[in-house]
Image (cartoon, rainbow, N blue to C red):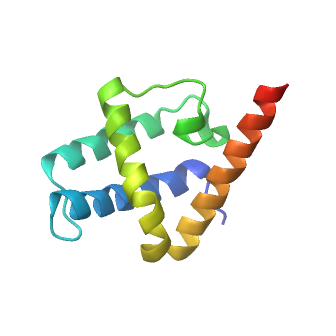
Amino acid sequence: MKKTRIQREKEMLPDMIAIYCHGNHHTKKGELCASCAALQDYALGRLQHCKFGNDKTFCSQCPVHCYKPDMRAQIKEVMKYAGPRTLFSHPIAGTAHALSTMQGVIKAKKEKRK
């Protein structure tokens, strides 16, 4: 059975936050500091209640920013750091995520030109 976009993001998001936390806050692998744990809970909650459901784009490309400004800044920092590193820890999922992101950026640029 094919996973929905929400399911894939719910699986990938904690991994990306763990990569960031381990690399920046020097936690043990598989553990999160309090700040990263709070960010993960918040982000998963936002994902759970996304009004676009499985038709959603990546949050960075979304026309509706449902994150609080401070949380949005934190998740952007996590994605910037962990995104490239997921290619090594989760090569298939990381590659699929990168391709999907590029497709979304290209689509958004085309729509702006119209």
Judged from this view, the residue extending furthest toward the front is 113
**Total numbered circles:** 0
Give me the residue at 45% from left, 76% from top: 88
**In the picture, residue 97 is in which quadrant?**
bottom right
Image position of 61 with respect to 84: above or below? above
Q: Looking at the picture, tell me which residue is in the foreground, 66 or 5.
A: 66
Judged from this view, the residue extending furthest toward the right is 114
Q: Quadrant of the C terminus?
A: top right
Q: Position of residue 62 (x, y in %)?
A: 59, 32
Image position of 81 with respect to 91: above or below? above
Image position of 46 with respect to 58: above or below? above
Q: Quadrant of the N terminus?
A: bottom right
Q: Position of residue 86 (x, y in %)?
A: 45, 67
Give me the residue at 28% from left, 42% from top: 39
**In the picture, residue 28 is in which quadrant?**
bottom left
Image position of 113 with respect to 77: above or below? above
Using residue 68 as the reference point, say whether residue 54 is left or right of it.
right
Using residue 87 as the reference point, say whether residue 73 is left or right of it.
left
Q: Position of residue 6 (x, y in %)?
A: 55, 48
Give me the residue at 35% from left, 45% from top: 77
Q: Looking at the picture, tell me which residue is in the foreground, 94 or 85.
A: 85
Q: Position of residue 68 (x, y in %)?
A: 35, 24
Using residue 78 as the reference point, say whether residue 31 is left or right of it.
left
Give me the residue at 67% from left, 39% from top: 55
